[in-house]
Amino acid sequence: MIDIHSHILPGIDDGAQTEEDSLEMAREAAAQGITTIIATPHHRNGKYDNKRGSIMRDVDILNELLVREDIPLIVLPGQETRINGDMVEDINSGELLSLNDSKYLFVEFPSAHVPRYSSQMLFDLQVAGYTPIIVHPERNQELIEHPNKLYEFVRNGALTQVTAASIVGKFGKNIKTFSHQLIEANLTHFVASDAHNTTSRGFSMQEAFREVKSEFGTDYFYMFMENGQLLIDNQNVNRLEPSSIRKKKKKFLGLF
């Protein structure tokens, strides 16, 4: 199993704080059946500013530590970048890091809204040769309220990644429901942990993939599994024709 989203590097964001935290996460990942994990520390989210060079160095150090500790896990470099107007320039300057140096690039929206320039930036990234992957859209308040916005992003070439814990209800019933709607409407292409630790923000990957197989069948199960491998190999991932999510209208019970 491949996990394309994690905060396993120690001491650089709100994920693992120490090397021992990283090792604890690595042991848990291996126990879940994860063999390869992409380290995606936060970048430009207002608090953390982890650039390409430092991430590459930290990944090398962690991989050496995993070998010494005999933990069967390979860590690959990546980055979770908050959407901003300088992304193409930061790619050209070497500040941004795609996932395993592939054509796939994580894009994070603020939790409460989608910036007005998002469509243009997603387009500009594609023109620059990258495929943007919108992370955890199921936890964005504006996309929950206006899912057609996400449909337009996907229809125009963006991909998305939902969080394993969201699928199994660890962020609440509403987010679980929306996650399932995204899968059903072919509006997501990856399941990943976004793990920050082994307690409050753990992996939940085995549980999520069991849920996918149970609720949506083996085709979706294998598609999500295969897409992780295709991504790290820099190959085109599987994507199905998306459809819009129709929000149910609330019934009005008036007094007559």
Image (cartoon, grey):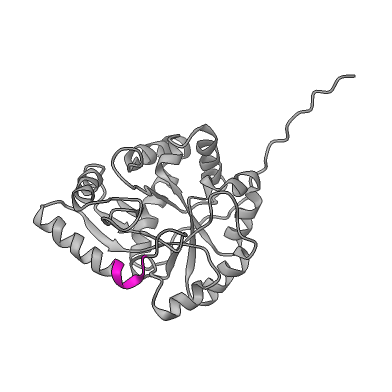
**Which quadrant holds the C terminus?**
top right
Which residues, given as a range, are shown in magenta? 50-55
Q: Position of residue 85 (x, y in %)?
A: 56, 70
**Label tally:** 0
Q: Nearer the viewer, residue 132 or 197?
A: 197
Question: In this rendering, is residue 76 above or below 176?
Answer: below
At a point 45% along the width and 58% down the height, the residue shown is 238
At a point 37% along the width and 62% down the height, the residue shown is 230
Q: Is 52 in the magenta?
A: yes
Q: Position of residue 23 (x, y in %)?
A: 19, 49
Q: Nearer the viewer, residue 205 or 82?
A: 82
At a point 24% along the width and 52% down the height, the residue shown is 35
Q: Residue furthest top?
A: 256
Question: In this rendering, is residue 118 above or below 23?
Answer: below
Q: Is 137 in the magenta?
A: no
Q: Is residue 79 left or right of residue 150?
A: left
Q: Position of residue 34 (x, y in %)?
A: 26, 49
Q: Quadrant of residue 211?
A: top left
Q: Main secondary structure of the magenta part?
A: helix
Q: Residue furthest front?
A: 47
Q: Quadrant of residue 208?
A: top left
Q: Quadrant of residue 246?
A: top right
